[in-house]
Amino acid sequence: MDGIIVINKQKNYTSHDIVYKIKKIVNEKVGHTGTLDPLATGVLPILIGKGTLCSKYLINHNKTYQVELKLGKKTETADREGKILEEKEVPLEILEENKVNKTLQEFIGKQTQIPPIYSAIKVNGKKLYEYARKNQDIEIKPRNIEIYRINLLEIDKQEKIIKFEVSCSKGTYIRTLCEDIAKRLETVGYMYNLNRIQVGEFNISNAIGIEEIQKSENPKKTIEKNLIAIEELFNSKESIQLNDKKLSLFLNGVKLTQKKQDGIYKIYNNTKFIGLGVINNKLLKRDIVI
């Protein structure tokens, strides 16, 4: 079984939990692209079999989230799990639609962002949250990110919650974005809920829950039914036909002359999909073979 299945992760599951459960069903190599925190829900692409080899082509995907930002309190972890560090008033005027909308739009574009201390980013071989748990100071370098789109969905004035949808680049921390928005509104806040609705071309409308798979009559067949094949995953890529002789050379790692632009190509022998090849300086080299 080779390909990708899009899981709709529910709360309190880690990404590793999902990988483990899928692996137990398919008895194949399994991986994921883009970790989701246990409290977060939504799209988690799971790579199965030779689909794991496609990871390098998927890790830079842009992402879209639906976010709930709760104002008035700042927490240690920048989400609802951490202990409260600070409380601040939230005047009703800062929850007016025009003000919130204007503030959100100010975050569109390229910018730098300092990741939260409670994150899995490694510094000097240790994850940041390991430093945080030991109350050790560590310099956190800012990252370049980009916010492509941010739209206000709803304002709950009673609960002091702002709901919005944001499309952003890889490496964007929504917890930090929430704190920065609250600061721009002259208060404090934390990420209350997070739902990832899109990763690249993988949309939540095409995702399936792990419990739905486990409760099905035949979980393995359910996965197969929802599996995106590697060939389908690269539908937009141009194809190259190889005859038997050239295919044999290709499979043995020989570089073949191809007068095409550099990039990824689907490789076929007649109608049979062989896998993926990469052209660099007019030379075609095998990459992933099914």
Image (tube, grey):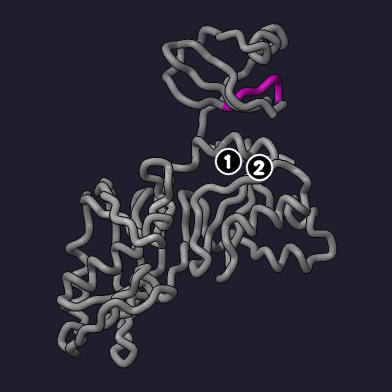
Residue that carries the numbered disc 1 in the rendered image: 233
Residue under the point 70% across and 68% down: 211
Magenta residues, dominant SS class:
strand
User: Which part of the image, by quadrant, shows the C terminus?
Assistant: top right
**Percent x, y for residue 101?**
21, 73
**Percent x, y for residue 126?**
42, 47
The outermost residue toward the bottom is 158
> Regarding mark 2 in the picture, which secondary structure is present there?
strand
- The residue range painted magenta reads 266-271
Q: Earlier in the sequence, mark 2 or mark 1?
A: 2
Residue under the point 35% across and 65% down: 175
Would residue 224 be found to the left or right of residue 71 on screen? right
Residue that carries the numbered disc 2 in the rendered image: 3
Residue type, mark 1 in image: Leu
Residue 194 is labelled as none
Q: Is residue 136 above or below residue 247?
A: below
Whether residue 153 is visible to the viewer of this picture, yes or no, is no
Badges 2 and 1: C-beta atoms under 8 Å apart? yes
